Amino acid sequence: DVKVTQSSRYLVKRTGEKVFLECVQDMDHENMFWYRQDPGLGLRLIYFSYDVKMKEKGDIPEGYSVSREKKERFSLILESASTNQTSMYLCASSLMGQSTGTFGSGTRLTVV
Amino acid sequence: DQQVKQNSPSLSVQEGRISILNCDYTNSMFDYFLWYKKYPAEGPTFLISISSIKDKNEDGRFTVFLNKSAKHLSLHIVPSQPGDSAVYFCAASEGNQFYFGTGTSLTVIP
């Protein structure tokens, strides 16, 4: 079974802090994604990556950046956390050309 | 602008009855459609999918119907069970990118 692991289930950070959310997958998937889930808005794509060192903006990239230095790891970075970034963050991965993605369990981030 | 829409935020169904969850999309280039199920505090898990060249796909109690002319898909669960209570997201893909709906919270009443 593919496993997508997000390093933290719950995180509380202060406004202005730099925040790193880590995601690791163990099945050699090319594609990796970061989403945030908010009530009434569903899952919105922040960034995705097709390969190492490659990244593409999703629908809501503002205030975020990403890093993919190794194939198995995709990091989401909040350069200066703000309260409107309080959300559930979900990482997913998939094989190139495969339409189904596998999700991690999510990180509930609260910015105070 | 939301390309995939689920207009019903919640649905309650009696155990044993049919649950019908609906989803509409706007982009005619979508070539694959999926349903995910999400329990609280867990990530979404893949449930069932359908290619744009088909109009129906069945897997046990779950059936997905696709009406391309109406840009509409639906998920039927029959018979519904209390363990089906969860949030259901429909998604559509174009290439390697997924677009998700806002989710429908299904409650199956014992």
Image: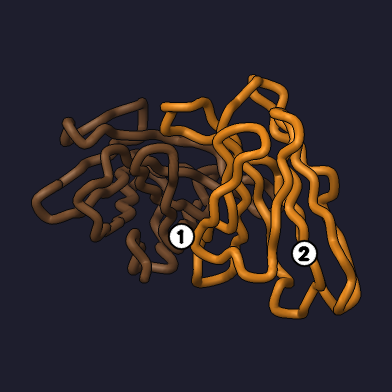
Chain colours: A orange, B brown
Q: Label 1, label 2: how many angstroms apart (C-alpha)? A: 26 Å
Disc tally is: 2
Is residue A102 visible from the viewing direction of this image? Answer: no
Q: Is residue B11 left or right of residue B52?
A: right
Most foreground residue, B29 or B12: B29
Which is more foreground, mark 1 or mark 2?
Answer: 2
**Cβ atoms under marks 1 and 2 closer than 8 Å:** no
Label at residue A24: none
> Where does residue B39 sit, x and y in percent of width and height?
61, 49
Q: Is residue A12 left or right of residue B69?
A: right
> Where does residue A61 sit, x and y in percent of width and height?
59, 64
> Where does residue A29 sit, x and y in percent of width and height?
60, 26
User: Quadrant location of residue B63?
Assistant: top left
**Point 40% across, 63% down: residue:** B11
Label at residue B103: 1
- Badge 2 marks a residue whose secondary structure is strand
Q: Residues within 10 Å of mark 2 (few under 14, many from 20)?
A: some
- Badge 1 marks a residue whose secondary structure is loop
User: Quadrant location of residue B78?
Assistant: top left
User: Quadrant location of residue A103?
Assistant: top right
Q: Is residue B101 above or below residue B29?
A: below
> Where does residue B65 sit, x and y in percent of width and height?
22, 41
Q: Amino acid at mark 2?
A: Leu
Q: Which residue is mark 2?
A: A78
Q: Is residue B101 above or below residue B55?
A: below
Residue reaching furthest front?
A53
Q: Residues within 10 Å of mark 1 (few under 14, many from 20)?
A: many
Q: Amino acid at mark 1?
A: Gly
Q: Disc 1 is attached to a residue of which chain? A: B
Q: Is residue B48 left or right of residue A55?
A: left
